[in-house]
Image (cartoon, rainbow, N blue to C red):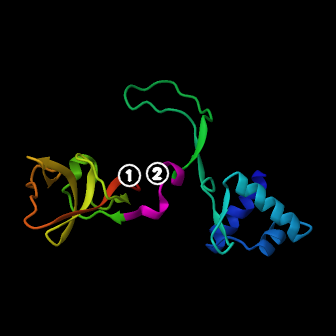
Amino acid sequence: MENIKQKIKAFYQGKKRMPSISEITHLLDAKSKTSAVRIISKLREQNFLDKDKTGHLLPGTLFYDIKILGLVEAGFPSAAEEELIDTMSLDEYLIPNKESTYMLKVKGDSMKDAGIIEGDTVLVERTSSPKEGQIVIAEVDGGWTMKYLRKKNGMPYLEAANAKYQPIFPRSNLRIAAVVKAVIRKY
């Protein structure tokens, strides 16, 4: 089954789309479309493939699973061996609610002490009930920003993670659109 998965992944990466049933039949040298449909069904059971409302194939939650090989010491060096512990899908790990999740590119340095710097991408989830202390995407007095949500005397305000920025106390309105769930940085 791994060989079949690799062929479908290669098609997807090359064509930037999922193959049709006819293309899977040809890709896998299946004897008939019925054989291809059976294989697709097994791959859907394994969450490798999914379908949209119209029946078109989509990558499943485990389409791009990544190996977890062990632990790495961030303190003093220690002996380590490569050992497959598990696999996981980044989508499954980071995005439990796909319909409410989107990404934003970070501009500015107001959240640098929270480990979020200019050029990073934040993964955010829409919410109607943010909690104090969370990093939020907020519209405050007509402008958008990313800050910690704080409260003082029961009133919400926004606080940067950089001492050179003052807290933002809304003059007229404060609307929280989303909560930051992850930071993505490529090196």
Circles 1 and 2: CB atoms closer than 8 Å: yes
Q: Position of residue 29 (x, y in %)?
A: 87, 66
Label of residue 97 in the image: none
Element type where label 1 sits in the image = strand
Q: Position of residue 157 (x, y in %)?
A: 13, 55
**Residue 59 appears in the figure:** yes
Seen in the picture, residue 99 relative to 131 is either above or below; the reply is below
Residue 115 located left or right of residue 182: left
Q: Which residue in the protein does label 1 denote?
A: 182
> To which quarter of the image does residue 106 belong?
bottom left
| Marks 1 and 2, the one that precedes in the sequence | 2
Q: Residue at x 21, y 62 (%)?
A: 108
Seen in the picture, residue 87 relative to 149 is either above or below; the reply is above
Q: Is residue 119 magenta?
A: no
Q: Which residues are magenta?
A: 91-103
Q: Nearer the viewer, residue 51 or 183?
A: 51
Q: Which residue in the protein does label 2 denote?
A: 94
Q: Nearer the viewer, residue 185 or 132?
A: 132
Q: Residues within 10 Å of mark 1 (few under 14, many from 20)?
A: some
Residue 41 located left or right of residue 15: right
Q: Residue at x 78, y 72 (%)?
A: 21
Residue 72 located left or right of residue 60: left
For badge 1, the amino acid type reads Ala
Q: Residue at x 63, y 72 (%)?
A: 53
Q: Residue at x 7, y 55 (%)?
A: 166
Element type where label 2 sits in the image = helix
Give how far apart the Cα atoms at labels 1 and 2 are. Answer: 7 Å
